[in-house]
Image (tube, helix red, strand yellow):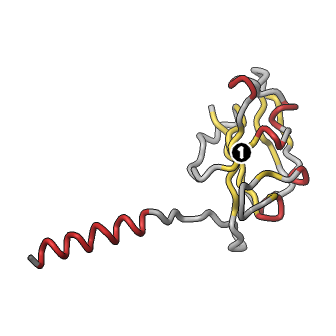
């Protein structure tokens, strides 16, 4: 009886704690919000589209992209650059996404107004 009870308690604790994902933070300990680029038509990586904050959506997936500066993927920014952080977060225009076009004509994020307080993750 006791081993079954211990197993049940262990499973309950594992399920309860797995719901809490680690929230990314910057070097100052500020919470970072992760946004993923959603290319129009699934293929539009133009500089204009990459720099448009309306093409980015909040995601709970905090994993990095491959970081090869080939195409836009994710940015992490402090709350200063986030509208509605406790509801449905969105990027503020003040984030000033700067995109650079590669030799293949595909743009990636090269800088943001968040600077070192945030991070950029591009992909192949």
Left or right: residue 35 compared with residue 60: right
Q: In the image as oriented, which residue stretches furthest toward the bottom?
A: 2
> Image quadrant of residue 5?
bottom left
Up the image or down, 75 lies above or below 23; here it is above
**Image x and y of residue 6, in percent:** 19, 75
Query: Which residue is at the front of the view, 109 or 15?
Result: 15
Quadrant for the N terminus, please: bottom left
Q: Secondary structure at mark 1?
A: strand
Query: Which residue is at the front of the view, 1 or 81?
Result: 1
Left or right: residue 47 compared with residue 104: right
Left or right: residue 2 compared with residue 31: left
- Identify which residue is drawn at 59% across, 47% down: 64
- Identify which residue is drawn at 76% across, 28% down: 45
Left or right: residue 34 compared with residue 52: left
The residue carrying pointer 1 sits among few (fewer than 14), some (14 to 19) or many (20 or more) residues within 10 Å by Cα, namely: some
The residue to which callout 1 is attached is 57
> Image quadrant of residue 55?
top right
């Amino acid at each position: 009886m006791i081993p079954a009870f211990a197993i049940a308690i262990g499973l309950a604790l594992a399920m309860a704690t797995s719901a809490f994902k680690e929230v990314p933070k910057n070097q100052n300990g500020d919470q970072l919000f992760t946004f993923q680029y959603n290319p129009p038509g699934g293929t539009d990586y133009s500089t204009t589209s990459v720099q448009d904050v309306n093409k980015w959506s909040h995601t709970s997936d905090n994993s990095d992209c491959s970081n090869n500066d080939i195409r836009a993927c994710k940015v992490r920014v402090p709350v200063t650059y986030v509208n509605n952080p406790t509801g449905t977060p969105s990027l503020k225009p003040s984030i000033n996404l700067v995109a650079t076009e590669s030799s293949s004509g595909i743009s990636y994020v090269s800088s943001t107004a968040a600077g070192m307080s945030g991070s950029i993750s591009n992909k192949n």
